[in-house]
Image: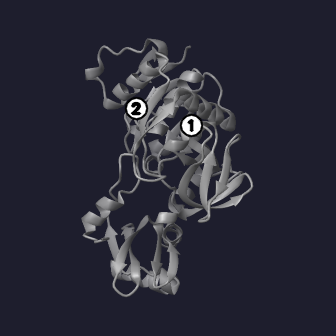
């Protein structure tokens, strides 16, 4: 089995990856090298922490065959062949990063590894060409904001985006890219993505296309259920409310991110997206208990204008339906994030002293 890992300009075959100098390397190299060594030794199962997409975070066991099945499905869906030049700039300890390593080993890619950061361009030579890369939304946002980053993105043929939802502002900004960009839907329990959504170009869509060989259904809450070889042919229940249309679906939000405010059910995921489009900036809605209504919510808005919180609240008051108006508006310069790039809502509540108990 050939294929190479490229780190700091040094190329090493996956089958002969040097491990003797681990202590001198970045953590991303150490994690990658450890996994590659285990894979090359023929290890049949791997422990992996989940993110909590289907319940409380936990550690699960994923088999080698599940990972190979997932890798083959991605390669087929995106027409990615052997010898591909790819970029790994996401955390290799998460399932998305591990699957980049599996694809690279199984399909003999030349995989360039850089430390995971909000700005991968900082670790790359100018205009380095790649056929394939996986990013989180925060990385894409950062790279779109610089000339070098935008040029680098356009030197990648195909980009998949996962780990967190893509907001309407970011979606609008990526339309100028020549790279083909896909949003992924999946989780640790499904061994990375089981559906892809084209985000730009002539095939741009609002719907996720379910990959071949994946069975789906919905429960009484209209939440997605998934079964395939990547789940050991057992049903995986999600908390994602979807509109299922044959082999496609539209993601509507999470069932556990719905509030009942004065008897009115409000999907905060959808409302977040609507407010982001209205204000052209990042918005986070946080649940809050209310003595009269039972539940309500506040809006946290990333300050990208000269408007005050009162002015922004006035805009929302005049633009939104009665029960879709936030109880309070907070302005922040940036949002706290988890290591995978998702907004850290718990940290944000603590920062703003918002009591959700």
Toward which corner of the image does residue 233 lie, by quadrant?
Answer: top right
* Location of residue 226 in the rendering, given as x and y in whole percent from the top left corner: 61, 48
Tag shown at residue 39:
none
The residue closer to the viewer here, 196 or 57, is 57
The residue depicted at 28 percent of the width and 71 percent of the height is: 354
Q: Are marks 1 and 2 in contact (CB under 8 Å)?
A: no
The residue depicted at 38 percent of the width and 45 percent of the height is: 118
Q: Give the secondary structure at mark 1.
A: strand
Residue 286 in sight from this viewpoint? yes
Tag shown at residue 114:
2
Image quadrant for the C terminus? Answer: bottom left
* Location of residue 29 in the rendering, given as x and y in whole percent from the top left corner: 36, 26
The residue closer to the viewer here, 265 or 308, is 265
What residue is shown with label 1? 156
* Location of residue 224 in the rendering, given as x and y in whole percent from the top left corner: 60, 56
Q: Is residue 293 above or below residue 266?
A: below
Q: Is residue 254 above or below residue 87?
A: below
Q: Mark 1 or 2 closer to N-term?
A: 2
Identity of the residue furthest to the top in this view: 16
Toward which corner of the image does residue 309 lie, by quadrant?
Answer: bottom left
Residue 208 in sight from this viewpoint? no
């Amino acid at each position: 089995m050939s294929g190479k890992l490229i780190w700091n300009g040094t190329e090493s075959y996956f089958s002969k990856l040097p491990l003797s100098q681990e202590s001198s390397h970045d953590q991303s190299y150490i994690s990658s090298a450890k996994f590659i060594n285990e894979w090359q030794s023929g290890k049949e199962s791997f422990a992996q922490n989940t993110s909590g997409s289907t319940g409380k975070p936990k550690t699960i066991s994923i088999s080698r065959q599940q990972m190979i099945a997932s890798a083959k499905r991605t390669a087929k869906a995106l027409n990615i062949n052997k010898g591909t030049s790819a970029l790994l700039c996401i955390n290799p300890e998460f399932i998305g990063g591990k699957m980049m390593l599996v694809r690279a080993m199984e399909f003999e890619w030349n995989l360039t590894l850089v430390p995971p950061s909000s700005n991968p361009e900082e670790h790359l030579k100018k205009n380095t060409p790649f056929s394939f890369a996986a990013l989180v939304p925060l990385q894409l946002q950062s790279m779109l904001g610089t000339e070098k980053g935008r040029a680098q993105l356009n030197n990648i043929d195909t980009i998949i985006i996962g780990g967190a939802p893509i907001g309407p502002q970011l979606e609008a900004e990526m339309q100028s890219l020549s790279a083909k960009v896909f949003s992924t839907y999946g989780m640790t329990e499904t061994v990375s993505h089981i559906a892809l959504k084209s985000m730009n170009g002539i095939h741009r869509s609002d719907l996720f296309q379910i990959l071949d060989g994946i069975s789906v259904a919905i429960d009484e809450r209209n939440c997605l259920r998934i079964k395939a070889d990547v789940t050991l042919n057992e049903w995986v229940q999600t908390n994602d409310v979807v509109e299922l249309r044959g082999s496609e679906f539209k993601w509507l939000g999470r069932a556990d991110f719905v509030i009942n405010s004065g008897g009115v059910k409000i999907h905060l995921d959808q409302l977040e997206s609507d407010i982001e489009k209205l204000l052209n900036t990042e918005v986070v809605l946080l649940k809050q208990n209310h003595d009269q209504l039972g539940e309500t919510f506040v809006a946290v808005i990333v300050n990208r204008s000269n408007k005050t919180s009162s002015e922004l609240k006035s805009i929302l008051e005049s633009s939104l339906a009665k029960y879709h108006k936030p109880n309070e508006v907070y302005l922040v310069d940036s949002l706290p994030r988890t290591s995978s790039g998702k907004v850290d809502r718990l940290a944000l509540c603590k920062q703003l002293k918002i009591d959700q108990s």
